[in-house]
Image: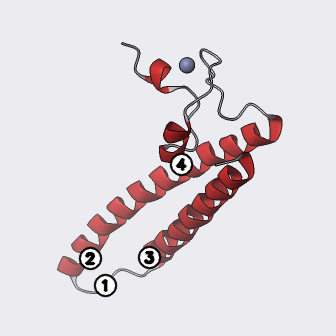
Amino acid sequence: MDLNQRKKQIQDRIAELTGNMQKISHDLDQPLPADLEDQAIDLEDDEVLEGIGRANLQEVRLLDQALKRIADGSYGICQKCGDPISQARLDAVPYAQICRHCASPD
Ligand SMILES: [Zn+2]
């Protein structure tokens, strides 16, 4: 995968995550049901949704930083040892900042 394809992969992922977050915030905006028991279930759901929302937001930030690294030419280079990060690792984690070796030194 070349850098342009990688950039598109990251942008698509950001669009997907942003879409998810919009759905989540829409769900969170729903008024609580009148029934107390339903309310309790609804509030528990909201906590789960907020957790997902936070995780999504964190990933979007990381992906956004990856796009900046593509722009400045430092993408795909381990920020610890300077070696190239393997394509397989970038396929799985497109925002990876360090190589597999530095991520789990053994
Ligand atoms: Zn490294």
3D distance between C-alphas at marks 4 and 1: 32 Å
Q: Residue furthest left?
A: 37
* Secondary structure state at the residue bearing disc 1: loop
> Does residue 18 lie above or below 69 as drawn?
below
**How many neighbours does mark 1 have within 10 angstroms: few (below 14), some (14-19), or many (20 or more)?**
few
* Secondary structure state at the residue bearing disc 2: helix
Q: Position of residue 55 (x, y in %)?
A: 46, 51
For the residue with label 4, is its CB less than 8 Å from the closest atom of ligand 1? no
Q: Are circles 2 and 4 on residues that touch, CB within 8 Å?
A: no
N-terminal-most mark, 3 or 2: 3
**How many neighbours does mark 4 have within 10 angstroms: few (below 14), some (14-19), or many (20 or more)?**
some
* Secondary structure state at the residue bearing disc 4: helix
Front residue (pair 21, 94): 94
Residue type at tag 2 = Gln
Kindly identify the residue that appears in the image at 59 percent across and 51 percent down.
Answer: 60
Return the residue at label 4: 59
Q: Which is more foreground, mark 3 or mark 2?
A: 3
Front residue (pair 72, 26): 72
Kindly identify the residue that appears in the image at 62 percent across and 20 percent down.
Answer: 83
Q: Position of residue 14 (x, y in %)?
A: 61, 59
Q: Where is residue 19 in the image (x, y as percent from the top left)?
A: 56, 70
> Does residue 63 lie above or below 76 as drawn?
below
Q: Quadrant of ligand 1?
A: top right
Return the residue at label 3: 27
Return the residue at label 2: 39
> Does residue 9 lie above or below 72 as drawn?
below
